[in-house]
Amino acid sequence: MTRVAVFPGSFDPMTNAHLDVARRAAALFDRLVIGVLNNTKKSPLFSVDERIAQISLSVADFGPHVEVVGFDGLTVDFAAHRGAAFIVRGLRAVSDFEAELQMAHTNRKLQPAVDTVFLMSALEFGYLSSSLAKEVAQFGGEVGGMVPAAVAAALRARFAPPG
Ligand code: PNS
């Protein structure tokens, strides 16, 4: 039996907490499809294509069974389209739990055949968020330890002083 999982998220941008979850999920599943949500409600810093490129570089050594794609609509439809029976989500701290529980139950109501699997983010990345990484970069702080190298480079370029 081939175990396929999707790992959906905004990833605007991917942090080292996301990367850690992706690495461990890649070791658990036969195929892992990282899905970048094209969220029309948010105005992201990076386009979906930019995020896909950054994440693809970051997970390049995880193996050929890991794919990065964009998606819109419901995560359960994305999972069905990809033949995935699992949704992977990371939990950094207890504060993530409530929203994740609500999402997991909603997804299960929509599609009972798809289960959500939670991985605890590595302790050292528990404080990280995409918004904080963006804020640090925006004000010239060092984001090297917070995000994958490809993302750090993209953040530096995006917030480089003009000229
Ligand atoms: O990285 P994020 O922003 O925490 O990811 C949230 C995401 C993309 C997993 C969630 O917003 C989502 O699944 N959106 C797709 C729409 C959907 O399926 N909604 C119903 C389930 S909550």
Image (cartoon, rainbow, N blue to C red):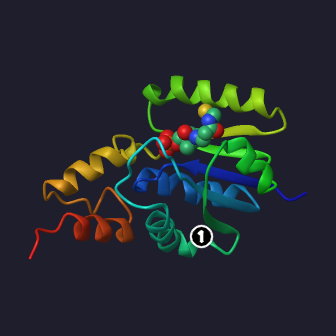
> Quadrant location of residue 149?
bottom left
Q: Nearer the viewer, residue 9 or 46?
A: 46
> Residue 129's x, y, as percent?
36, 44
Q: Quadrant of residue 109?
A: top right
Rendering coords of residue 120 (x, y %): 53, 40
Query: In the figure, is residue 159 to the left or right of 27?
Result: left
Q: Amino acid at mark 1?
A: Phe
| Residue lying at 24% horizontally and 71% vertically, measured from the top left | 157
In the displayed structure, does residue 6 sit left or right of residue 156? Answer: right
Question: Which residue is found at the position 70% from the left and 55% from the top?
Answer: 28
Q: Residues within 10 Å of mark 1 (few under 14, many from 20)?
A: some
Of the 4 image quadrants, the one containing the C terminus is bottom left
For label 1, the residue is: 62
Query: Element type at marker 1?
Result: helix
* Residue at 84% over, 37% down: 113
Foreground of the two, 59 or 75: 75
Residue 37: where, in percent of width, then height?
55, 51
